[in-house]
Image (tube, grey):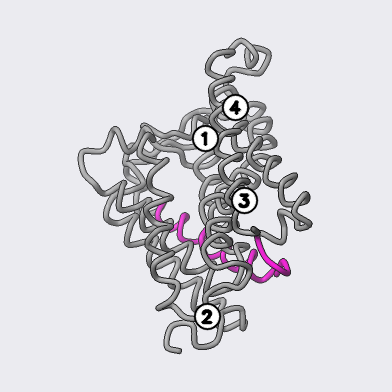
Amino acid sequence: MEKLRWTALMILSAMIFLIAQIVIVLNQEVLEAVPSFLRGYLATHIPYLAVFITIAIGARLMHSSIWKLISRRIRMECIAIPAAIYALMLILMDIIYAGSISQTGIGPWVFTVQAAVVIILTPMQAAAEEIFFRAIPLRIAYGERMPERLSRALPFIIFSGVFFLLPHLGNREVEAAASILPLLYYFSWGALAAFLAIASEGFEATAAMHAVNNIHIALFVNYSSSSMMTEALFINSVLPSDIISIIAVYIVFAATFMALRRTGSIKEGFING
């Protein structure tokens, strides 16, 4: 019965997301009162906000909370350490791609207003995605107790990679790419996030990494053909899903895993047990 309820909440959340998208597409005049530089970002993120609220209400009705879906106990080290490591990786990637990055000329007022909106909404969007694509499916598959061993978690990890990839097939950067590398990028991100979440018994790390990634794109270095329609400080003419980006994702997840293991946040014997 419990798994059926989580399945129903997941289906309801997907329907709410689609309805919110359709309403925005059919009633674009609703956003006309919003400054033009925010319209694309809000049109993309309002459906995620609707999903966040839906899951929060649904979890409460099931005598739980949205925070317990993320982790039984929110651990600050599982937020701060992954966020710092991921931010460092993004800075290093910006240095590597410095030759293809140029300034956009965004004004300070536009950037300040945009930053306030992005910093509020992006963490909710990232949390909504982590819960929808990984936390709730994990509950449906295994119940409240996460797999103790990698061998038992592996089918879900592969599923999570595929499941995370599917809705990103329509992203502008995927359509603009001339290879399957963006597909491999999204599959890898989804699978590695599931691996790290199960190993650490919580989704704080992956939600923090997801939020840092999206805030960086929205505010600091966006890229051509981006689905994140904001005016960042810089623009990168290279898509962030080439082979170097994919290798960087594996490195940053490995570094985060090792750092969290040193803090005792990784289950003992998860890989070798």
- Real-space CA distance between mark 1 and mark 3, rounded to the nearest whole angstrom: 22 Å
Q: For label 3, count other residues whose C-alpha is less than 10 Å away and answer few (under 14), some (14-19) or many (20+).
A: many
Q: Which residue is mark 3?
A: 127
- Disc sitting over residue 20 in the figure: 4
Q: From the viewer's perspective, is the residue at label 2 or at label 3 nearer?
A: 2
**Element at label 3:** helix
- Real-space CA distance between mark 4 and mark 3, rounded to the nearest whole angstrom: 18 Å
Between discs 2 and 4, the one toward the N terminus: 4
Q: Which residue is mark 2?
A: 148
Quarter of the picture containing the N terminus is bottom right
Identify the amino acid type marked 2: Glu
Q: From the viewer's perspective, is the residue at label 4 or at label 1 nearer?
A: 4
Apparent side of residue 60 relative to residue 231 in the rendered image (left or right): right
Q: For label 1, count other residues whose C-alpha is less than 10 Å away and answer few (under 14), some (14-19) or many (20+).
A: many
Q: From the viewer's perspective, is the residue at label 1 or at label 3 nearer?
A: 3
Decide: marks 2, 4 in contact (CB < 8 A)? no
- Real-space CA distance between mark 2 and mark 4, rounded to the nearest whole angstrom: 38 Å
Q: Give the residue displayed 43% in from the left and 76% down from the top.
A: 152
Decide: marks 1, 2 in contact (CB < 8 A)? no
User: Which x, y percent locates residue 122?
Assistant: 61, 43
Q: From the viewer's perspective, is the residue at label 1 or at label 2 nearer?
A: 2
Q: Give the residue displayed 52% in from the left and 36% down from the top.
A: 233
Between discs 2 and 3, the one toward the N terminus: 3
Would you identify the image quadrant in which residue 73 lies? bottom right
- Real-space CA distance between mark 4 and mark 1, rounded to the nearest whole angstrom: 26 Å
Q: Which residue is mark 1?
A: 232
**Position above or below: 124 against 15:** below
Choose between 10 and 73: the one closer to the eye.
10
User: Which x, y percent locates residue 79?
Assistant: 64, 64
Q: For label 2, count other residues whose C-alpha is less than 10 Å away and answer few (under 14), some (14-19) or many (20+).
A: some
Identify the amino acid type marked 3: Ala
Q: Magenta stretch: give its range.
A: 70-94
